[in-house]
Amino acid sequence: MSATRHRAAAVATVLAVALGPAAAGCGGRPAGGRGGGRVGVVVPFLTSPFWQAYNQDIPRQAAAQGVRVLPTVNSNGDAGQQITDVQTLLSEGVKGLVVSPIDSAAIVPGLRAAQRAHVPVVAVDVAPRSGKVAMVVRADNRAYGRKACQVLGRAVKTGKVVQIQGDLASVNGRDRTSSFSGCMARHYPAIKVLNIPARWQADKAAAGLEALYTANPGIKGIYLQAGGVYLAPTLRTLQRHNALVRAGSPRHITIVSNDGIPQELTAIRRGFIDATVSQPADLYAKYAMYYIKRAMAGKTFHTGRTDHGSTVVELPGGILQDQLPAPLVTRHNVDDPALWGNRR
């Protein structure tokens, strides 16, 4: 097989894995033991392998911790629908809610409705702008941007890099963007950052990268703020321009991602991307159940070190966040069995 055909076959394999089958439905039958009342779980969308993994872990973690969960509700990326989903679950008499907000501000009316109903809420992955939650289960998203900046800065040194942003209505999108851009400006001023506001949508990422690469064929690096939705369109676009070249070649475009999905780990092994930050989908599910079970029992929480290797910090407005670890993954540790993406 020629080198060109070998590379094309390898790319096809990675793309096939990256695209994967989208989850067709939501959770299963209510899981878990007795007591505490039923818990409603709302996810933002299920088109990303990251959220598919989280969705699959919820019933397992609920069963392990004796939490009675209803089938997961998928808001399909619609912030208005997410409020309706919360209100519907409250009308069904849930005693606890686990919600992954689509929009940090738009979720606030849903949190107020839950507070009026005396139903505790745990937020996962995205912190609300205001409102009452028992805990936010989330990693340090500003660290994601800094880690991506450091990897790209050391590799590129000078030239242009692309940042495919998340939704800036979400605190995650804002944190990753501001930390990455600020780090680049401070530490790597010879690098110019070109932004694509993709709003966690694969089609926007694809169209934006196509336009930017056509106008700037000499780009040297790309930062994907969400590998779960941006990895496949990025690899496909670069392949179409004959620009998807393995690490080690002078033509290689350095790519750093966020999520830690199995498809990113495969792409790192094959040399198509260089690193990802492993956002802990498994721990999100585990500690969402941990905190909602205790919140429904009337427990309150405080800042400081936890017994599971993280730190609870206080966000603006007095909101508490359990800041879970999110390690940087490169070719040096990509086979670590502790990474959740290696257990899929």
Image (spheres, rainbow, N blue to C red):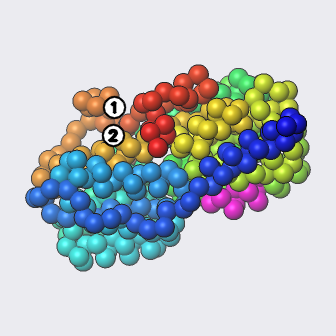
Q: Position of residue 293 (x, y in %)?
A: 19, 51
Read off the residue under disc 1.
Answer: 310
Q: Which amino acid type is shown beneath numbered disc 1?
A: Ser
Above or below for 284 versus 109: above
Q: Position of residue 292 (x, y in %)?
A: 23, 52
Q: Residue at x 59, y 44 (%)?
A: 263
Q: Position of residue 68 (x, y in %)?
A: 20, 60
Instruction: Decide: few, some or many residues near mark 2? Use Cα within 10 Å; few <14, some 14-19, many ≥20.
Output: many
Numbered badge on residue 194: none
Mark 1–mark 2 contact, CB under 8 Å? yes
| Residues drawn in magenta | 201-209
Q: Residue at x 54, y 56 (%)?
A: 48
268 or 296, which is in the foreground?
268
Q: Position of residue 196 (x, y in %)?
A: 71, 52
Q: Is residue 76 magenta?
A: no
Q: Earlier in the sequence, mark 1 or mark 2?
A: 1
> How far apart, in angstroms, are the residues tagged by discs 1 and 2?
7 Å
Instruction: Count how many numbered circles sit on residues in the image.
Output: 2
Using the rendered image of the protein, determine whether residue 25 is visible from the camera's viewpoint: yes
295 or 3, which is in the foreground?
3
* Helix, strand or loop for the magenta stretch, by majority: helix
Under circle 1, the secondary element is loop
Quadrant in which the N terminus is drawn: top right
332 or 343, which is in the foreground?
343
Q: Is residue 203 magenta?
A: yes
Read off the residue under disc 2.
Answer: 322
Q: Which amino acid type is shown beneath numbered disc 2?
A: Asp
Q: Residue at x 52, y 66 (%)?
A: 77
Q: Is residue 53 left or right of residue 58?
A: right
Q: Is residue 59 left or right of residue 117?
A: right
